[in-house]
Amino acid sequence: MVPNYQVVETDEVGNAAAVIIDGERYLAFNPEWLAQYEADPNARWQLYGVMAHEVGHHLQGHTITGTGSRPPTELEADEYAGFILAALGANLEEAQSLWATLPAEGSVTHQPQHQRLAAVERGWLRRKGQPPATATPAAQPPAGRAHLRLPTMVQYRGSTLRSLKFIPEHIIRTRPSPSSHSIDHE
């Protein structure tokens, strides 16, 4: 699958967000937020989880609706992230590590923690070839081997962009191509 979005650094998002600006798709991240993951190499699965969640919004068409974060789309993005994390080699605990830090009660736009953990587990199980314990309303992750491809960094509203050098080289691809969703880590 060829990426159809650009990864950009900006302080205009709190953590990370899938956005469309002037018809172009972006995966935007806040450099200050990202720094916490650079400082803690054990948090890499949490970073991969956030990025896979945001990529899921783009690939599942959530960003073209213009409705922003909504509970059903957030669970779909969570399930997609679980699928990708399993493909990258995370065990279930590692795959759920980000969602284990989220508020138990949820918010207006995001479900309670237990529902989000279950969505990640469904995606993880699906990638491992195991049927989920319960039916899911979420879209099916891509069949076969999953590839998380992050394109070349670009300039965004005057920000200077830098490489995500702590992401393994086999994940990063350098083929750039041209509403908002975020992980909601309140």
Image (spheres, grey):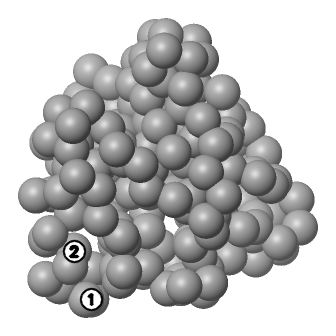
Q: Label 2 belongs to which residue?
A: 37
Task: Quadrant for residue 172, please give it.
Answer: bottom right
Q: Secondary structure at mark 2?
A: helix
Please tell me which residue lies in front, 152 or 168: 152
Instruction: Judge the density around disc 1: few (<14), some (14-19), many (≥20) Cα neighbours within 10 Å.
Output: few
Q: The C terminus is located in which quarter?
A: top left
Residue 185 in the image: above or below residue 174: above
Task: Quadrant for residue 58, please give it.
Answer: top right
Give, as a three-letter code, the residue at label 1.
Asn
Q: Secondary structure at mark 1?
A: helix
Q: Label 1 belongs to which residue?
A: 42
Q: Is residue 109 left or right of residue 23?
A: left
Task: Quadrant for residue 21, please give it.
Answer: top left
At a point 66% along the width and 58% down the height, the residue shown is: 175
Please tell me which residue lies in front, 105 or 37: 37
At a point 68% along the width and 50% down the height, the residue shown is: 3
At a point 27% along the width and 89% down the height, the residue shown is: 42
Residue 78: x and y in percent read 51, 49
Q: The N terminus is located in which quarter?
A: bottom right
